[in-house]
């Protein structure tokens, strides 16, 4: 899934012509030392050469492998090839809600959410009006994603989810599922553009299935970057598939988790897996922006460096 911002977001920082804040890098928040309270990309022994090579192979495979968009189990449109054309083929929840339509729909939500998150970090708390606005935005995001069946939805829970996503202290245990993952992404998207900051990905069944099944196949490939007997729980700790029911993810489908060759983490309802998935997608973004790949197309017809939203949207379509 994806959203794009508009020129009004320039008040959060200087935005390049035709670019967006959470969708295009280079934006600076007024929150000052905001990066100090964010979940940072870890620089530990998990960032091994083998892991980097597997991420590079995943990016290369997505670039080179033809992709057939599908809707309700049936092919829709023609095959496309490459990250940019895969992104241009994005739609949700139906084919006529394409990249541009989605941008017009969701940009205002991300703009408002970025401002609310920045104020929460700066002030340490929301006013009653800000808390009400955040709750309305969260519900809009859940409704857009078709994930409104949240028994624990209320203002304190929304704030707890946003705080947890931003790395701020929480007073209640925040829930996590495919719906709340969208809220975490909404709350942190404005952090795009600084290496030490950590916008969250929507780590749902589609995105997780795309990544995990591609890594699983690459690790099982003799002669590939992973040595024989490589353990995904060591190379990619806390990474696993979030269960889904549609398309290739249904029981018996090509991406039914029972078809995985290796043992991966249990990711459902896990904040640690949400963090790990977001970190991994940031590595994919870094590989795309390191050179050798075309830039990310924008809904306005321009281009920009790849962002979490752009990568996530391609993987969302791939994971159907």
Image (cartoon, rainbow, N blue to C red):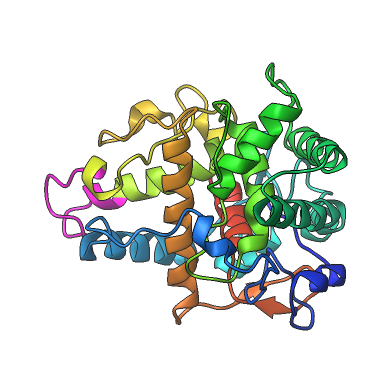
Query: Residue drawn at (66%, 48%), measured in percent from left and top?
Result: 124
Query: Residue drawn at (57%, 35%), measured in percent from left and top?
Result: 170
- The vertical placement of 118 against 127, above or below, is below
Which residue ends up furthest to the top in the rendered image?
151
The one nearer the camera, 35 or 66, is: 35
Is residue 224 rendered magenta in the image?
yes
- The vertical placement of 91 against 262, above or below, is below
Over which residues does the magenta segment extend? 218-232
| Dominant secondary structure, magenta | loop
Is residue 318 rendered magenta in the image?
no
Residue 155 at what x, y percent from top left? 76, 29
Query: Residue drawn at (16%, 47%), measured in percent from left and top?
Result: 230
Q: How many numbered marks appear?
A: 0
The answer to which quarter of the image holds residue 262 is top left
The answer to which quarter of the image holds residue 193 is bottom right
Query: Residue drawn at (42%, 62%), measured in percent from left and top?
Result: 283
Whether residue 202 is visible, yes or no, is no
- The vertical placement of 95 against 266, above or below, is below
For residue 20, side relative to residue 315 (left or right): right
- The quadrant in which the C terminus is found is top right
The answer to which quarter of the image holds residue 169 is top right
The one nearer the camera, 174 or 25, is: 174
For residue 179, side relative to residue 11 (left or right): left
Which residue ends up furthest to the left in the rendered image?
228
Residue 161 at what x, y percent from top left? 62, 36
Residue 164 at what x, y percent from top left? 56, 40
Residue 231 at what x, y percent from top left? 19, 43
Whether residue 134 is visible, yes or no, is yes
């Amino acid at each position: 899934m994806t959203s794009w911002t508009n020129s009004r977001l320039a008040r959060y920082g200087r935005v390049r012509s035709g670019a967006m804040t959470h969708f295009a890098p280079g934006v600076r928040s007024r929150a000052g030392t905001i990066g100090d309270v964010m979940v940072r990309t870890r620089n530990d022994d998990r960032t091994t050469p083998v892991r980097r090579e597997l991420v590079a192979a995943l990016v290369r495979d997505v670039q080179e492998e033809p992709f057939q968009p599908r809707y309700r189990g049936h092919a829709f449109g023609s095959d496309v090839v490459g990250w940019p054309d895969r992104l241009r083929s994005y739609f949700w929840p139906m084919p006529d809600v394409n990249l541009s339509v989605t941008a017009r729909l969701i940009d205002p939500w991300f703009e408002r959410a970025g401002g609310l998150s920045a104020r929460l970090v700066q002030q340490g708390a929301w006013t009653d009006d800000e808390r009400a606005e955040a709750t309305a935005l969260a519900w809009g995001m859940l409704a857009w994603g078709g994930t409104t069946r949240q028994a624990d939805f209320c203002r304190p829970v929304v704030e707890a989810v946003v705080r947890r996503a931003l790395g701020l202290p929480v007073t209640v245990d925040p829930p996590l599922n495919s719906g709340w993952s969208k809220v975490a992404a909404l709350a942190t998207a404005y952090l795009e553009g600084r290496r030490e900051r950590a916008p969250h990905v929507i780590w749902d069944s589609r995105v997780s299935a795309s990544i995990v099944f591609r890594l699983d196949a690459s690790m099982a490939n003799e002669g590939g970057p992973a040595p024989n007997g490589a353990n995904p729980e060591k190379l990619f700790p806390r990474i696993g598939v979030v269960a889904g029911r549609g398309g290739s993810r249904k029981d018996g489908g090509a991406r039914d988790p029972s078809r995985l060759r290796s043992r991966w983490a249990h990711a459902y309802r896990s904040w640690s897996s949400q963090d790990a998935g977001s970190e991994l997608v940031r590595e994919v973004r870094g590989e795309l922006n390191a050179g050798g790949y075309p830039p990310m197309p924008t809904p306005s017809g321009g281009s920009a460096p790849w962002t979490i939203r752009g990568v996530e949207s391609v993987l969302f379509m791939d994971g159907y």
